[in-house]
Image: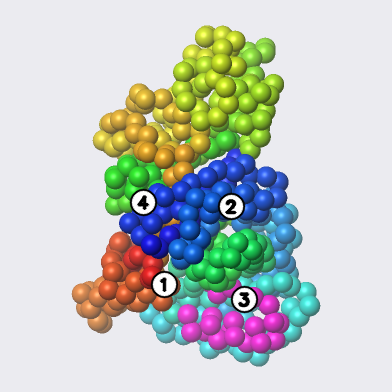
Amino acid sequence: MSIRIGIDVGGTSTDAVAVDAADRLVAHAKAATSPEPFDGIAQALDAVLAQVDASEVTHAMLGTTHLTNALLERRSLSRVGVLRLSAPAATQPRPGTGWPPELAAVIGPVAVVGGGCEYDGSLIAELDEKAVRTFAESCVGKVGAVSVTGVFSAAHPAQETRAAQIVSEIVGVPVSESHVVGGLSLIPRENATILNAAIISVARNVIDGFHQALHARGLSVESYLTQNDGTLMAAEAAIRFPLLTVNAAMANSMRGASRLSGLDDALVIDVGGTTADMGLLVDGFPKQRVRGTEVAGIPTNFPTPQISSFAFGGGTLVKTSPALAVGPQSVGYRVTQDALIGGGSRLTLSDVSAAAGRDVGFGDAALSAQIPAALVSEAMGWVDQQVRRLVERHQVPQGGLPLLAVGGGAHLVGSDIPGVSQVIRPPHSALANAYGAAIAEVSGSVDRVYNYDRFGREHCLDAAQEAAVDAAIQAGAKRGHVRVAAIKEVPLTYVTGQTCRVQVKATGPLRA
């Protein structure tokens, strides 16, 4: 038997599951997420390993909010040297323009040097290697990482790769290349690459801690992190491209909800201890944003799921004086101790849900008996209204899709929500996030500009699909089992001829 372990670190709980080769759930456990997250990982991992034969474990997958929190809290970020290859075509605005001051502080030496190319690969300017070396020398001892961004490098990365090589040799720190991190637009791609460089050290610490937890338990297995599109990235690759994992938590839940329910097209709401997130499943994968998204208040254009969020969850506090007020404050991971039904003294939405007769999964429901019926009705009505608003944001056909309710706080979601065909609670719904990590596949993607006039549309699409499949195999997918999951063509109407941006994603199961 081959067993894969999936671990998801949420704000309230750390969940772990074990699945067999047929993706059947064979073990599961929950641990409270503590101020030191690796304590929760260790507890959940120990609990799962007590239920299976550790010698049969072949893979371990981690989904975590560590990297997202580092950006939101401006914590443990590296100082970043910023190199742009764009002179003389694009020297303004300066990198970091418009950033929040506390994040702009991570930007170290900046240089805009000769380089860049047009959409078709023709040069704007030769790479100014002398200027690159001068910039690199200015970074020595002053930065923990460097970002390199070139005009149209997402389609033609040769100059960017050469500049990164020079910088790495001189500075000796990690270098983030924008053609791997973001899309075509220069400034959002540069922003994403700087952020990626800033959290590389955090990613290294997370992955080192994950590996230590595995090795301490005698597990010498292949390790992966989950990424924003619901697929896997090898742990070593995640150290280089950590930004591609920052929205993975909801993607895990959506993939898990899809597999647990057997539905490929649905709305998914994941309710935790503090927040509720909703996304749209299309063909079993999270629908991605058409445009870029903001990360920590900074515009970027790397791929992220289209998610709507609202501040309510199982740990959300309910105040009754002078009038009913729900949240946004939450007791978070302490809900099992602080809530009334957990023996605490604070009124939470979990208490209200228990008083409404719902199974919240912990505590003693009898301790909620003193909550007035009118308060219960009003508070649960408030929750229903927030869920309805989240449904409306996704603009799905009225009543055309089911709503899959997952997460530890899914008991808050009512059974009759306007705008959806039905509310479904899949089996093991509270473990959808960790299960989604355990059953995730490996992906490869291509985002390039092709000239259909020159090569022909079919030839270009075939080349893009072949490159995406090869990328998936290189990332760890099983050869012969990779399929093309999505193809998107975006005509570049602002250039002459039939020029098109082609985006292809291929996915496949992990190699044994």
Chief secondary structure of the magenta portion: helix
CA gap, disc 3 and disc 1: 23 Å
Q: Nearer the viewer, mark 2 or mark 3?
A: 2
Residue under numbered circle 2: 46
Q: Earlier in the sequence, mark 2 or mark 3?
A: 2
Residue at (29%, 37%) from the top-left corner?
401
Which of 428/425 is in front? 428
Magenta segment: does it hold 75? no
Residue under numbered circle 3: 175
Do the numbered discs 4 and 2 sit on residues whose CB atoms are within 8 Å?
no
Which of 28/36 is in front? 28
Residue under numbered circle 4: 24
Magenta part of the chain: 157-178
Establish if 103 lies above or below 155. Answer: above
416 left or right of 227?
left
Which of 10/26 is in front? 26
CA gap, disc 2 and disc 3: 36 Å
Q: Residue furthest right?
A: 141
Q: How is the image coloured?
A: rainbow
